[in-house]
Amino acid sequence: MLIAASPDFGMVYDFEDDTVERESNVGLFNSPAGVGFATDLGFYAELNKAWSIAFALTDLGSINWNEGTAEYSSNGSLILDDVTDETLVDSLVDVITGEGKYTDAFSTPLSTAMKIGVGFKVEKYFKGNFPGEMLIELNYHQGFNNMPANSTIPRFSLGAEWMPSNWFRLRSGISVGGYDDFNWAFGLGFDAGIVDFDLATAYTNSYFNGNSAKRIGLAISSRWTF
C-alpha cells in the first residue's frame, strides 16, 4: 500500500526513529501531497422534445504524489474463528498493519470512465396526456481502471424521476454491474418555495437482505432558492 501525506499534517510514520518530530500546521488550505491534472469531455444533444442523448469521458488525468511518500507491505495468513479472542484480534491487527518504509514519488491514475446516457421525457412524448412530468434515463458506465469508486466491470443503470405536482418529486432507480453488482436507490423531493428538501437511500435492497446485507446509504439535503 502506497501512502502520501501533506507536510502540514506533521505526520510521523511508525517506522521512523523515535527522535523524529514534526509540527502540524493544519488549516483550510493545506499544502498538497501531490500535483496532478484532470479534465472531463462530453456532449449532450436533444433529438426532439422527448429524447436526448449524452456522452462523456470523465476524470482523464493522473496525480503525482511526492510529499511524505511511504510504502506498507504485509504477507501473512490468519484464521479468525472467535472475534472475542483478544490474542487473535491483536494478531490480525499485526498482519494488516505490515511494515513500512520510505519510497520514491509515485503516480496514480484518476478513476477514468466512459459514460453514455439516453433520456426520455414521458410527458413530452404523450404531448401533455400524462399526469405531471417524468424523466426516464438509461445509462452505461465503463470504467477503465479499478481505482476508488471505479471498476472495469461495466455498469448499466435505469432511473426515473416523477413530478406529479410542482412541489413533490418521486425518484427511484436500479443499477447492475460495476463494483456494487446490484443497487436499488429510492428518493423523495419536496419544494417548499424558497427551500427544497431531498431524501434519498442507496442500497435500498439491503433492507430486505437480512444478514447478507453489505451496506446501506442515506442522504438528506436542503437547498435555499432565491
Image: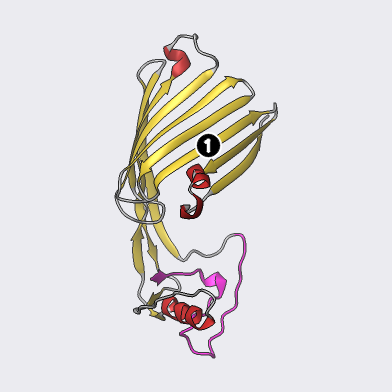
Residue 10 x, y percent position in the rendering: 56, 75
Occupied quadrant, residue 30: bottom right
Front in this rendered view, residue 103 or 214: 214
The quadrant in which the C terminus is found is: top right
Q: Position of residue 217 (x, y in %)?
A: 54, 48
Which residue does the numbered mark 1 point to in the structure image?
A: 186
What amino acid is labelled 1 in the image?
A: Phe
Of 21 and 196, nearer the camera is 196
Is residue 20 rendered magenta in the image?
yes
Where does residue 18 sit, x and y in percent of width and height? 53, 90
Q: What residue is rendered at 58% in x and 20% in y?
A: 164
Q: Residue drawn at (51%, 27%), measured in percent from left and top? A: 161
Q: Quadrant of the N terminus?
A: bottom left
Q: Classify 86 as above or below 202.
A: below
Tell me the residue at 36%/41% (across/down).
Answer: 176
The segment highlighted magenta reads 1-28
